[in-house]
Structure formats: structure tokens, C-alpha cells
Image (cartoon, helix red, strand yellow):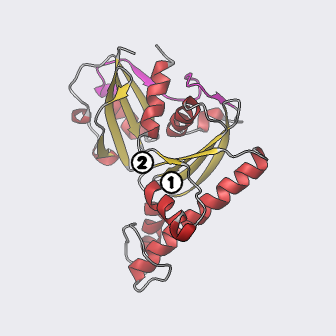
């Protein structure tokens, strides 16, 4: 692929922007989505922009700011994954990009967990069909809800924990959020596997800001690994795969 491709992943919290050339993703710029503007885009000349966006306001900004042809990711855009879903138009573009990245690895079935504003699970079967998934509150979202819905609980940053018993309110919140995420990941993967892939071991991929924390905690003290591979650029790789299939 000789084209220069602008990759844009717009999530509720952050937007990631990179230019891919000759099939390789360049440096990724991460900015708060709330501050996205025309000046956020790189000045380098590109041939195509491939965009996954779940924020309509940001989509409107990009639609007027782009100086190259845009390809807006949705269920109608070829990405190497067939969609088996009752209302495909309701699937988030980022989830479709994650599924495209997983399918490109050629190790199906697969489950993709994205630890972002929401925690999403996306399921791709052995034939490369997108089956659906799970959506739960992300760790920062849950922390924000605890702070806003209670009188005394502080807004707490999610970070590494060293114990399962908190010695402060903030520590107790961190432990609750992270252990909850580990439990969610274990139970979701187990249920998805039992119901959809009996007798098989799906490849479990993870991305998103809290993926490393959850994966590390899951294997602490000899715990069974629930996540096989962590890829912070998984969504961007999916956008690049979609670009390859839309010359």
C-alpha cells in the first residue's frame, strides 16, 4: 500500500490520530475529544482518511475540516468481517475496526475487549463473522459515577493496586474498580466461549487505556491468564485493514 492514509479514531474521551504509510502506522497523537478542531489534523498531504467515530459533534468537525476523501467506518464498509447482527447500523465504528483488526490476524475465533470510556467485548467466530458483544461501564466512567452519585466518595484515578484490602477510601475504590474489571473479563470470556465456541479456545485481545492494569492484575499471584495479547493500537490497525480493503 503506497497511499498515505490518515487514521482517526474518535471515542467519547479521546481521539487518536496517525498517518500510515506503506502499511505502517506512524506516531499516534492522542487528544481529548472535547478539544478536537480542524487544527488537530496533521498538515501532511494524505490520500484518504479512514475514520471511526462515536461522537456526532466530532464527526461534524472532521467532515468540514478534512482536505482528503473520507471513509467513514460503518457496517456497510468492507473490513474483512461479515456482520451477523439484527441491527448492524447500531454497531459502534470502533467496534467494527477492532473486529477487523482481530480478523486480520487469522486466529479465529476471537474476543476483543476494549477498556475505554465503556468496556466493550466483541465476538468474531471461526468464519470471520461479527456476532455481537457486551457493553459495560469503563473504569473511569464508573469512578466518575461513584463520585457524582455519592456525597463523600472522591473522584479517584484508576491506577495499579498492591492489595485487595483498601486502607483509604480512594484505595478501596481503585481495588473495587480493578477487581470488578478482572471479574467481568473472566466471566464474560467464559460465558461467551461456552455459549459460542464449546471445545475451542478463542484468542482474547485487549486494547484501551486500562487493558494493561487489568491483565496484570488477572495474573497476579499465579492467576489464570484471561487476556492473550494487549495491543494499544488495535483500533488503528483495524482502520488500516479497512483502508486496505477499500482501495
Q: Magenta includes 67?
A: yes
Q: Is residue 65 above or below residue 144?
A: above
Q: Secondary structure at mark 2?
A: loop
Q: Is residue 117 above or below residue 84?
A: below
Horizontal and vertical percent position of residue 167: 41, 86
Residue at 48% across, 32% down: 238
Q: Which residue is mark 1?
A: 118
Report the disc number at residue 12.
Answer: 2
The front one of 35 and 176 is: 176
Q: Is residue 134 above or below residue 158?
A: above
Residue at 44% across, 22% down: 71
The front one of 193 and 116 is: 193
- Counting other residues with Cα less than 10 Å from the Cα at mark 2, is it few (<14), some (14-19), or many (20 or more)? some
Extreme-bottom residue of the structure: 167
Q: Looking at the magenta stretch, what is its main secondary structure? A: loop
Residue 194 in the figure: left or right of residue 238: right
Task: Specify start and end residues of the magenta stretch as a single range.
Answer: 63-83
Q: Quadrant of the N terminus?
A: top left
Decide: marks 2, 1 in contact (CB < 8 A)?
yes
**Between marks 2 and 1 in the image, the one whose residue lies nearer the viewer:** 1
Amino acid at each position: 500500500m503506497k497511499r498515505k492514509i490518515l487514521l482517526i479514531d474518535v471515542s467519547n474521551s479521546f481521539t487518536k490520530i496517525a498517518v500510515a504509510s506503506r502499511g505502517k502506522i506512524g506516531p499516534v497523537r492522542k487528544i481529548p475529544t472535547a478539544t478536537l478542531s480542524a487544527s488537530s489534523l496533521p498538515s501532511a498531504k494524505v490520500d484518504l482518511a479512514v475514520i471511526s467515530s462515536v461522537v456526532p459533534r466530532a464527526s461534524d468537525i472532521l467532515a468540514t475540516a478534512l482536505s482528503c476523501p473520507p471513509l467513514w467506518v460503518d457496517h456497510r464498509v468492507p473490513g474483512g468481517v461479515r456482520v451477523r447482527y439484527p441491527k448492524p447500523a447500531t454497531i459502534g465504528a470502533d467496534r467494527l475496526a477492532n473486529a477487523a483488526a482481530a480478523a486480520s490476524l487469522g486466529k479465529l475465533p476471537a474476543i476483543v475487549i476494549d477498556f475505554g470510556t465503556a468496556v466493550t467485548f466483541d465476538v468474531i467466530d471461526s468464519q470471520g463473522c461479527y456476532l455481537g458483544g457486551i457493553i459495560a461501564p469503563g473504569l473511569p466512567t464508573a469512578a466518575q459515577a461513584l463520585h457524582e452519585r455519592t456525597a463523600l466518595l472522591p473522584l479517584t484515578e484508576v491506577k495499579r493496586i498492591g492489595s485487595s484490602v483498601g486502607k483509604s477510601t480512594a484505595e478501596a475504590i481503585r481495588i473495587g474498580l480493578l477487581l470488578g474489571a478482572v471479574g467481568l473479563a473472566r466471566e464474560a470470556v467464559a460465558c461467551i466461549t461456552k455459549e459460542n465456541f464449546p471445545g475451542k479456545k478463542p484468542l482474547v485481545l485487549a486494547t484501551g487505556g486500562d487493558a494493561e492494569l487489568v491483565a496484570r492484575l488477572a495474573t497476579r499471584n499465579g492467576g489464570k491468564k484471561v487476556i492473550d495479547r494487549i495491543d494499544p493500537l488495535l483500533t488503528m490497525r483495524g482502520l488500516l485493514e479497512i483502508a486496505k480493503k477499500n482501495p
